[in-house]
Image (tube, coloured by chain):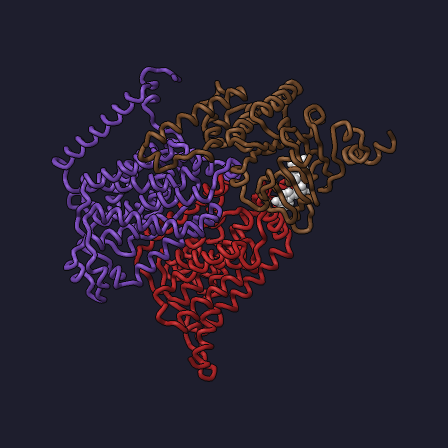
Chain colours: A red, B brown, C purple
């Protein structure tokens, strides 16, 4: 493998890793606060991509407008899902909410099939993302740079919210101890809603960029990236935003580089993440940066 | 004395991160006696129970039952060796009937398993019937025989505590640990409980260690008492010695009270 | 009520089921018989998941994986060597795959046992995990099984899968296995070992304090559940006569979970009722997805509608009737008699 190819793979890994990271953040934030695996998160990612497609083809919006609108609508959708399907189950056994989430996941996926049909659709890419940039021997699609950059800015925004605003303080308090936060006057329900909103917005952003990068839309497109991002979140230490980012990037690199160096393993590509998951759960269930949950008798 | 010691804790220490919940707890409990473990909230009493019953692996120290080292063995092995316990916050099998709760306690010493059950072998039928009978007898002892087919979580509080004891007895223990058995009981019930504890001790040849905040119970039935404060054993002795110990009074009531008294 | 009375009643019901099947075999059309067959298989699957999740409290999402294992093992064994030679067109099968052959009963048992061994092997590391992590990890296991099935073409014929699997799984086989599953699981949960499993479900810590080797019993329950899931998969393969890795997606597990939750976690009766009801519902909903012609006018089918209705139903049940149809209650002859005679409670 020559240097040019390596750089190519490196950039691809970075792109894929950032996309995973953006989705993983949503999983990790919700799990950190509610101890709920938001199974429907992959579908939120998928719908974010479809909304842009609608904006472009039905309403003929310009790209940036469609993108922003889609992110907002998806954020609203994420909050709605929480209100309807999870909030009534806050006091129920934890698995009930998880089953509800599985139900929502199938529901959204199949609603998408009903509306958009199961056939994959091509995505139109704006021209400025199409023309490769030449850097010496390396041909780089602007997209491969655009995705990590935009992801980086979005993550910075998130870090600002979580560590510099009152809402962020609320999030961190709730993830420590929901009941106490409630007693201390943290507007728990509002903070949870905002958490879902932010997580869904990031998933939408990821979905849109995913659709640009692998220019295809289909209703089941959220399933596999959703799982992988969840695994990335577990790998990084669920509940930790930094962990989710690191986990996403690591997973992106593992996937691309393994296939690059061992092409004969390409068929097993979708199994890597799950094998990684099982290994982490066995070796270090708290992940890289996660805190150890207490197990009191 | 050492010949008659059934259970021995040797310098048990439990650390949680920076917190030392229990520090060098040593005790030898005489066979057939009723002993007490007292101390203010958070003193480390339940943690001692958890180390003895295998729920926590002590950071340091050993637990010996009849001279056999049980340190670090899982809870079910401690139970098999003859240590049974109740929990401070009652932990019954809520969806099961009162009778089934006790039968579960008998399970550990049952010889026939699932395969015999599927094949419906006579040995299985016979043993299961014997277990049922024994469990009913135990329920009779704690006065719950009439409620045998009720769901455990539908019982009133006092009955739940007694069921937990019956269930522990079903494991045929030689050493029984009771974590705050009188909590939430009125004086009348507490009085009955004291008689009951003495009663089961002689009926089942038990040695009993109990944690209790109600001093009437502790002073009334315990022959030996250990006092913990912030994880440290501050006193040990017979009830009257403990009652007269200024360190204990201080731990419970604060320094002020002692100096003013 | 006397034990002998109960036994006679149970035998009477079994005989009635036999008569019904005999009648169905002779007078119902193929489509209806197929639905009956699917009902039997779904009840097997639901009972096995209920043992794992409903009675032992282990949230497992790996059923599709066990079913796949059972289905592949059974299919390989019941197809003739000649048939396999025709089937493996891209990559020839390994000789031992090519030549393996066994009667249907042996093949189904082999499928179940292989699944049970797989259950045991993944159970050892995974069953230490808590509820939601266990769910995700077992789901991961099922996905890994699928990916592997895709990538060992000399065993599984890769993405093409198998076609023309002998259709031995008739009403008698399916309901026979359904009865066996029912019998074994009911015997286990009504024994004191079953009490131990329920104890683990209700309070793991207390179960440990009662001397129960929690891990061992979890492993036992998980392996037995995996066995019957494998059996269900094996029967399904012979019933549908085609299998491929795509068939064993998460949706398959979802359907089984739906039946168990609808029936009631920890209720055998509930699993059977929901097994019948939901299988029928799923088939009925198929009509929604196919084009409907009203005279000359044709309504187009709506793909995806079936799962939309289905998943909505699951969300509704979880939100508004979490205990399902039966909660943890069971049908008993005594209960039926009390209901009939209007007595509230009798000995
Ligand atoms: N698993 C654990 N992890 C961290 N800290 C623990 C754990 N278990 C107990 N502790 C801490 O150890 C200390 C002793 O707790 P313990 O429950 O033994 O007290 P106790 O004497 O039983 O009090 P109480 O009378 O309130 O029951 C407490 O500070 C408690 O917070
Ligand atoms: Mg305590």
Towards the viewer: B66 or C255 = B66
Residue A175 in view here: yes
Ligand number 1: quarter of image? top right
Tell whether A18 sits left or right of C328: right
Q: Position of residue B185 (x, y in %)?
A: 63, 23
Q: Quadrant of the N terminus of chain A?
A: bottom left
Residue B222 vs A139, above or below: the answer is: above
Outermost residue on the front side: it is B3
Residue at 17% across / 48% down in the picture?
C167
Q: Position of residue C18 (x, y in %)?
A: 19, 32
Residue at 43% across / 33% down in the picture?
B110
Residue C67 vs C152, above or below: the answer is: above
Q: Quadrant of the C terminus of chain A?
A: top right
Tell whether A174 sits left or right of C195: right
Outermost residue on the left side: it is C26
Q: Position of residue B179 (x, y in %)?
A: 62, 32
Q: Position of residue A45 (x, y in %)?
A: 44, 56
Tell whether B20 sits left or right of C218: right
Quadrant location of residue A9? Answer: bottom left
Residue C266 vs A247, above or below: the answer is: above
Q: How many marks?
A: 0
Residue C291 in view here: no
Tell whether A81 sits left or right of A263: right
Outermost residue on the right side: it is B260
Residue A193 vs B125, above or below: the answer is: below
Residue at 42% across / 58% down in the picture?
A274
């Amino acid at each position: 493998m020559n240097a040019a190819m390596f750089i190519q793979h490196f950039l691809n890994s970075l792109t894929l890793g950032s996309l995973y990271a953006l989705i993983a953040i949503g999983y990790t934030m919700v799990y950190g606060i509610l101890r709920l695996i938001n199974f429907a998160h992959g579908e939120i990612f998928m719908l974010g991509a479809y909304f842009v497609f609608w904006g472009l083809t039905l309403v003929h919006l310009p790209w940036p407008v469609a993108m922003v609108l889609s992110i907002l609508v998806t954020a609203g959708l994420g909050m709605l899902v929480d209100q309807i399907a999870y909030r009534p189950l806050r006091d129920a056994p934890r698995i009930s909410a998880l089953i509800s989430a599985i139900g929502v996941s199938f529901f959204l996926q199949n609603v998408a099939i009903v509306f958009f049909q199961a056939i994959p659709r091509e995505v139109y890419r704006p021209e400025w993302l199409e023309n490769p940039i030449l850097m010496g021997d390396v041909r780089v699609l602007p997209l491969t740079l655009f995705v990590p950059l935009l992801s980086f800015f979005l993550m910075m925004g998130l870090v600002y919210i979580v560590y510099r605003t009152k809402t962020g303080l609320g999030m961190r308090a709730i993830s420590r101890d929901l009941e106490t936060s409630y007693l201390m006057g943290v507007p728990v329900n509002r903070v949870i809603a905002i958490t879902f909103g932010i997580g869904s917005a990031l998933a939408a952003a990821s979905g849109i960029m995913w659709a640009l990068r692998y220019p295809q839309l289909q209703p089941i497109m959220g399933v596999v990236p959703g799982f992988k991002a969840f695994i990335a979140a577990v790998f990084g230490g669920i509940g930790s935003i930094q962990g989710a980012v690191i986990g996403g990037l690591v997973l992106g690199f593992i996937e691309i580089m393994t296939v690059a160096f061992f092409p004969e393993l390409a068929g097993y590509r979708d199994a890597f993440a799950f094998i990684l998951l099982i290994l982490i759960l066995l070796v270090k269930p708290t992940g890289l940066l996660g805190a150890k949950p207490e197990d009191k008798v | 004395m050492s010949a008659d010691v059934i259970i021995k804790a040797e310098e048990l220490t439990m650390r949680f991160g920076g917190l030392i919940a229990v520090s060098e707890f040593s005790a030898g409990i005489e066979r057939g006696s009723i002993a007490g473990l007292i101390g203010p909230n958070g003193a480390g009493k339940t943690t001692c129970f958890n180390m003895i019953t295998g729920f926590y692996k002590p950071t340091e120290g050993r637990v010996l039952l009849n001279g056999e080292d049980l340190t670090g063995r899982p809870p079910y092995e401690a139970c098999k060796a003859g240590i049974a316990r109740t929990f401070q916050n009652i932990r019954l099998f809520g969806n099961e009937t009162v009778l089934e709760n006790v039968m579960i306690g008998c399970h550990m010493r049952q010889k026939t398993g699932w395969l015999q059950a599927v094949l419906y072998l006579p040995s299985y039928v016979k043993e299961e019937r014997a277990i049922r009978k024994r469990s009913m007898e135990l329920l009779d002892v704690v006065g719950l025989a009439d409620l045998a087919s009720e769901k455990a979580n539908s019982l009133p509080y006092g009955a739940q505590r007694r069921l937990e004891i019956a269930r522990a007895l079903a494991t045929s223990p030689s050493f029984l640990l009771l974590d705050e058995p009188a909590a939430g009981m009125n004086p009348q019930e507490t009085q009955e409980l004291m008689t009951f504890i003495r009663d089961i001790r002689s009926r089942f040849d038990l040695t009993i260690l109990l944690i209790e905040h109600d001093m009437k119970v502790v002073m009334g039935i315990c022959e030996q008492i250990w006092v913990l404060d912030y994880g440290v054993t501050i006193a040990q002795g017979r009830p009257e010695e403990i009652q007269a110990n200024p360190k204990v009074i201080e731990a419970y009531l604060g320094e002020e009270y002692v100096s003013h008294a | 009520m006397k034990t002998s009375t109960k036994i006679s009643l149970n035998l009477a019901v079994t005989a009635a089921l036999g008569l019904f099947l005999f009648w169905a075999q002779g007078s119902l059309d193929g489509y209806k018989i197929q639905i009956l067959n699917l009902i039997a298989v779904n009840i097997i699957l639901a009972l096995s998941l209920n043992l794992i999740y409903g009675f032992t409290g282990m949230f497992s999402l790996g059923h599709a994986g066990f079913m796949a294992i059972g289905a592949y093992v059974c299919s390989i064994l019941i197809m003739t060597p000649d048939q396999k030679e025709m089937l493996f067109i891209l990559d020839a099968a390994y000789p031992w795959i090519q030549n393996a052959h066994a009667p249907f009963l042996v093949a189904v048992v082999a499928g179940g046992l292989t699944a049970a061994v797989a259950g045991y092997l993944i159970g050892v590391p995974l069953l230490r995990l808590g509820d939601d992590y266990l769910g995700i990890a077992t789901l991961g296991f099922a996905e890994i099984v699928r990916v592997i099935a895709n990538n060992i073409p000399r065993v599984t014929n890769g993405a093409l899968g198998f076609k023309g699997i002998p259709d031995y799984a008739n009403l008698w086989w399916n309901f026979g296995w359904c009865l066996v599953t029912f019998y074994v699981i009911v015997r286990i949960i009504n024994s004191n070992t079953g009490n131990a499993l329920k104890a683990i479900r209700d309070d793991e810590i207390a179960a440990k304090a009662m001397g129960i080797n929690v891990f061992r019993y979890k492993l036992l329950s998980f392996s037995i559940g995996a066995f019957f899931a494998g059996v269900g998969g094996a029967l399904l393969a012979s019933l549908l006569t085609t299998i491929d890795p795509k068939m064993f997606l998460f949706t398959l597990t979802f359907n089984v979970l739906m039946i168990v939750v609808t029936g009631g976690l920890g209720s055998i009766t509930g699993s059977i009722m929901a097994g019948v009801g939901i299988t029928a519902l799923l088939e009925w909903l198929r009509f929604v997805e196919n084009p409907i012609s009203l005279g000359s006018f044709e309504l187009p089918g709506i793909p995806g509608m079936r799962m939309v209705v289905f998943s909505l139903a699951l969300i509704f049940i979880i939100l508004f009737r979490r205990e399902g149809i039966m909660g943890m209650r069971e049908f008993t002859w005594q209960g039926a008699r009390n209901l009939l005679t209007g007595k509230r409670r009798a000995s």
